[in-house]
Image (tube, rainbow, N blue to C red):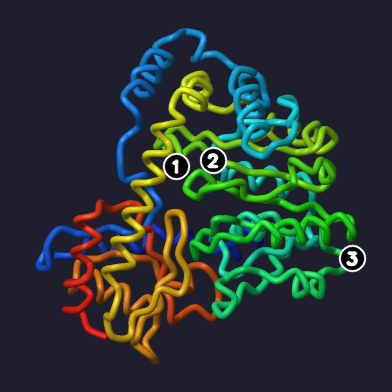
């Protein structure tokens, strides 16, 4: 008699990717309130720069782009990115500590696997980005929730984190500007977490995917040079250069960690996708003004979104920054999913329910306002007023 082979229980216990469920609700919308306004997935709401597209096309047709590249990424991009963050943060980043990954999701997967094993724990800010939680669940690493309370602007507290650390803890993750809440962590908060990690022998994994949509130097960690053995720094080229389909991210870590990262990358990807690497290396300096114009455009969209919700009965923006807003709905006793589904059906607006990002969030929904143009965001006011509150 044959028996059924078993699937990895860690994978079975991992949540299903939630965005397809929400997109299915949108497909059922009949268009009665006007064109769908999709604020669910963080997708750049404008195209890549024309010259970047031209360079991507030219590089895609080059035979060299079809061959394997270095495990840690093409030297031209690693060097360009190391120089960029050295200049941005006022410190020295060795290009050999930079690894190019297949998107920032993979960068986090690699970082988690490099620092922790099954049975260990990593502190994860809650609300969390669901792919971070899914990654740790798959790997059998405990995602220990670090509460980011609304009354603190969804910013984590270092004293609370210290109380969660035990002998199994290997790292603390911070995401700023935050997905899903939009909260931008103050530099002193980030630096306090770095000190805690150094004191307790932990890694600080810092995800700054949406860094280019805020102004100023986010922290002084790289400039100080004191945290070379503590900081693992993650970044995505997807949003800043409008190329999410090309899947390029970056991981920067101390040399000892970077050497081990190469083992993980070799088993996962052999090399990152090559078509976009040289064009993005050019774009880092070549499109500085274009990126700044896009940041200003996102600021305009944020202002339009905020204005749309001024004075709407019961609705409240609890946090906002970069691409996202965390919106509190007024329908007490209703699940966030039921509110979102009805919002799509009656108002033609798609957001994501708060519980996609952790427990205790039935009163919230995530809005990726950067997806939509100013006119669409202005139209939200009438649609939400008609929906009720």
Along the line of sight, the residue nearer the viewer: 189 or 12: 189
The residue that mark 3 highlights is 167
Residue at position x 37%, y 75% in the image: 337
User: Which residue is at the far bottom?
Assistant: 333
Closer to us: mark 1 or mark 3? Answer: 1
Q: Which mark sits nearer the N-terminus, 1 or 3?
A: 3
Measure the C-alpha gap from mark 1 to mark 2.
7 Å
Kind of element beneath mark 3:
loop
Along the line of sight, the residue nearer the viewer: 148 or 103: 148
- Compared across the picture, whether 199 is left or right of 364 comes to right
How many numbered marks are there?
Answer: 3
Kind of element beneath mark 1:
loop
Q: Which mark sits nearer the N-terminus, 3 or 2?
A: 3
Residue at position x 35%, y 32% in the image: 48
- Compared across the picture, whether 388 is left or right of 236 comes to left
Quadrant in which the N terminus appears:
bottom right
Q: Is residue 4 visible?
A: no
The residue that mark 1 highlights is 239
Q: Is residue 256 above or below residue 323?
A: above
Quadrant in which the C terminus appears:
bottom left
Kind of element beneath mark 2:
strand
In the rendered image, which quarter is residue 35 located in? bottom left
Q: In the rendered structure, are the residues bearing label 1 and label 2 in contact, judged by CB atoms less than 8 Å apart?
A: yes
- Compared across the picture, whether 372 is left or right of 265 comes to left
Q: Is residue 207 above or below residue 199?
A: above
Residue 22, position in %: x, y? 34, 63
The residue that mark 2 highlights is 236
């Amino acid at each position: 008699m044959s028996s059924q082979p078993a699937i990895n229980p860690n994978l079975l216990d991992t949540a299903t990717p939630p965005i397809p469920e929400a997109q299915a609700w949108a497909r059922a919308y009949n268009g009665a309130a006007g064109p769908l306004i999709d604020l669910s997935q963080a997708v750049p709401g404008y195209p890549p720069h024309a010259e970047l597209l031209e360079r991507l096309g030219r590089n895609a047709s080059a035979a060299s782009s079809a061959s394997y590249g270095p495990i840690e990424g093409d030297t031209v991009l690693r060097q360009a990115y190391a120089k960029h963050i050295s200049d941005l943060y006022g410190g020295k980043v060795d290009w050999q500590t930079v690894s190019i990954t297949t998107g920032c999701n993979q960068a986090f997967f690699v970082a988690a696997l490099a620092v922790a094993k099954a049975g260990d724990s990593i502190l994860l800010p809650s609300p969390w980005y669901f792919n971070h939680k899914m990654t740790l669940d798959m790997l059998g690493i405990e995602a220990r929730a670090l509460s980011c309370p609304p009354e603190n602007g969804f910013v984590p507290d270092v004293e609370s984190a210290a109380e969660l650390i035990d002998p199994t803890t290997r790292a603390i993750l911070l995401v700023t500007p935050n997905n899903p809440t939009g909260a931008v962590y103050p530099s002193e908060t980030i630096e306090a977490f770095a000190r805690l990690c150094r004191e307790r022998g932990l890694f600080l994994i810092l995800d700054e995917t949406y860094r280019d949509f805020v102004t100023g130097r986010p922290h002084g960690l790289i400039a100080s040079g004191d945290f070379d053995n503590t900081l693992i720094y993650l970044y995505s080229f997807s949003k800043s250069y409008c190329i999410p389909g090309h899947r390029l991210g970056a991981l920067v870590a101390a040399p000892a960690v970077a050497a081990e990262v190469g083992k993980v990358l070799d088993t996962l990807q052999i090399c990152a996708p090559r078509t976009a690497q040289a064009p993005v290396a050019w774009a880092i300096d070549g499109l500085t003004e274009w990126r700044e114009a896009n940041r200003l455009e996102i600021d305009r969209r944020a202002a339009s979104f905020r204005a749309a919700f001024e004075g709407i009965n019961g609705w409240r923006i609890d946090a906002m920054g970069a691409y996202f807003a965390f919106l509190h709905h007024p329908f007490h006793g209703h699940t966030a999913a039921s509110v979102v589904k009805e919002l799509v059906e009656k108002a033609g607006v798609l957001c994501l329910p708060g519980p996609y990002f952790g427990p205790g969030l039935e009163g919230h929904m995530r809005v990726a306002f950067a997806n939509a143009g100013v006119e669409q965001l202005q139209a939200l006011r009438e649609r939400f007023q008609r929906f009720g509150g």
